[in-house]
Amino acid sequence: MTDDHKPVTETDLHAFVEGFLDEQRRREVESWLKNHPGKKPRSDSGRHRRPS
């Protein structure tokens, strides 16, 4: 028996927040997040801003 599900990575979480995952992977990450609520990524929109 093989497991076709890839583990959720930090890259997946970032892509999830940015909206870059395809439909199937988005559903897999959403399902994973339901079982790992402490891992839910936070949007950090100010992170890439340069100081004025």
Image (cartoon, rainbow, N blue to C red):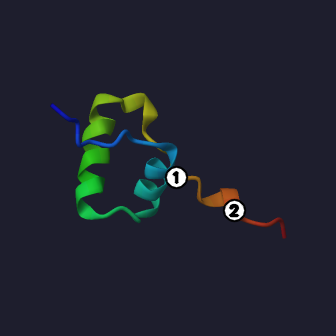
Q: Is residue 14 left or right of residue 29?
A: right
Is 40 positioned to the left or the right of 28 in the image? right
Q: Amino acid at mark 1?
A: Ser
Q: Quadrant of the N terminus?
A: top left
| SS category of the residue bearing label 2 | helix
Q: Looking at the image, which is closer to me, 3 or 43?
A: 3
Q: What is the x, y in percent for residue 42?
A: 50, 46
Q: Position of residue 49 (x, y in %)?
A: 72, 65
Residue drawn at x 83%, y 65% is: 51
Rendered residue at 22%/36% (across/down): 3
Q: Say which mark, if any, is on residue 48.
A: 2
Does 2 appear above or below 21? Answer: above
Where 39 sits versus 23, above or below? above
Q: Position of residue 46 (x, y in %)?
A: 66, 59
Relative to residue 26, is residue 17 drawn left or right? right
Asked if 5 appears above or below 14 in the picture, the reply is: above
- Residue that numbered label 1 is attached to: 43
The residues tagged by marks 2 and 1 sit, at their Cα atoms, a distance apart of 11 Å
Q: Amino acid at mark 2?
A: His
